[in-house]
Amino acid sequence: MSISFTLTPAAEKFIGRVVRFSGIPSAGFRLLVSPGGCSGYSSEFSAEAAPKDGEQVFVVSDLKFFLPAESRMLLDGVTIDFTETPTSSGLSIINPKQAACGCSSAENAAPPGVAKIEIGSIGRGGRPALVS
């Protein structure tokens, strides 16, 4: 299956840094996207040495992406951006075909067709520290 998605310069820079700072030679960027959440997407990402069984490798802007079948279907035609505000930062998946969210439960909801993937969702290994 041939897919096409676009990276903004900010996303390209962020993903390049994730891969470069992973310390894994020839690392790729695993992006797992599934339906769900208010924006229509739920996502996880990591730098990995090689694709898993069933994943295809796509090169976009000289970056290797490891994408399972479901992610490939959902990413076709989208733009991936990196956004940063004083209180949060993360990848945004902008889908021009996505309808607006019907709920009004989120005051800071992303614009229609945009999924936010927060930096804090990146696993660093080990257990998170408990806050008292």
Image: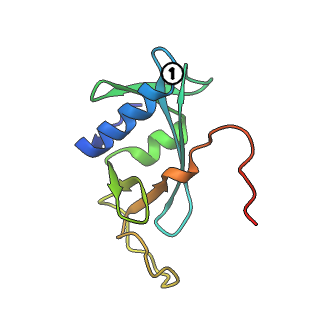
Residue 1 horizontal/vertical position (percent): 42, 31
Residue 17 horizontal/vertical position (percent): 39, 33
Q: Is residue 124 above or below residue 95?
A: above
Q: Is residue 62 visible?
A: yes
In the image, what residue type sits under mark 1?
Gly
Name the colour scheme. rainbow
- Residue at the location (43% across, 66% down)? 87
Residue furthest to the top:
25
Task: Pick the residue in front: 88 or 116.
Answer: 88
- Residue at the location (62% across, 39% down)? 124
Horizontally, is 68 left or right of 94 in the view? right
Task: Pick the residue in front: 8 or 34.
Answer: 8
Image quadrant containing the C terminus: bottom right
Q: Is residue 95 above or below residue 62?
A: below
Residue 53 quadrant: top right
- Mark 1 lies on residue: 23
Task: Pick the residue in front: 17 or 94.
Answer: 17
- Residue at the location (71% across, 50% down)? 128
Residue 107 horizontal/vertical position (percent): 45, 82
